Image (spheres, rainbow, N blue to C red):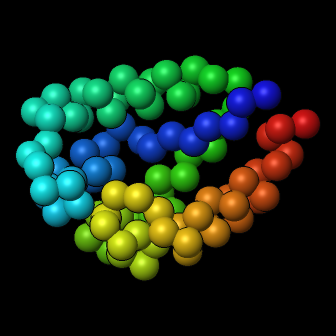
Amino acid sequence: MHLTYAVENDERSVYPANLQNAFHTPSDPNWYAKLQQINEYIKRQEFFIDIEPYFYDTQGAMDYGFSVDGIHPDIRGKMLIGELISKNKNLFK
């Protein structure tokens, strides 16, 4: 069994500015198309949980309460992922 998670095909998911701030390098100009391709692959898997909506702030960006760089979940973000998996564990039976 594979457990994957997906973000919706939405440009709010990963802001290029957050990538610039985190890695001090410009974003790939094709980042959004690549994100869509990855998400489509994930959604074709037998099991996945869409966690994206739980990470947005009121502006539609990743809530810094769950991430220090606006890209990767921190400990609170990982705790939220665990809670979402537990909440949806019936999908994996």
Q: Can residue 18 be seen in this view?
A: no
The outermost residue toward the bottom is: 65
Horizontal relation, residue 37 to residue 6: left or right = left
Q: Can residue 13 be seen in this view?
A: yes
Can you give x and y, in whole percent of width and height, for residue 76 in the image?
A: 55, 74
| 47 vs 20: above or below | above
| 57 vs 12: above or below | below
Can you give x and y, in whole percent of width and height, for residue 27 in the image?
A: 14, 43
Horizontal relation, residue 19 to residue 41: left or right = left
The outermost residue toward the front is: 24
| 79 vs 29: above or below | below
Horizontal relation, residue 36 to residue 3: left or right = left
Quadrant the C terminus occupies:
top right
Quadrant the N terminus occupies:
top right
Can you give x and y, in whole percent of width and height, for residue 61 in the image?
A: 29, 64
Q: Residue at 62% across / 59% down in the picture?
A: 81
In this figure, what is the number of numbered marks?
Answer: 0
Q: Using the rendered view, name the quadrant where residue 56 is placed.
A: bottom left
Most foreground residue, 17 or 60: 17
Q: Residue at 16% across / 63% down in the picture?
A: 21
Can you give x and y, in whole percent of width and height, for residue 87 in the image?
A: 77, 59
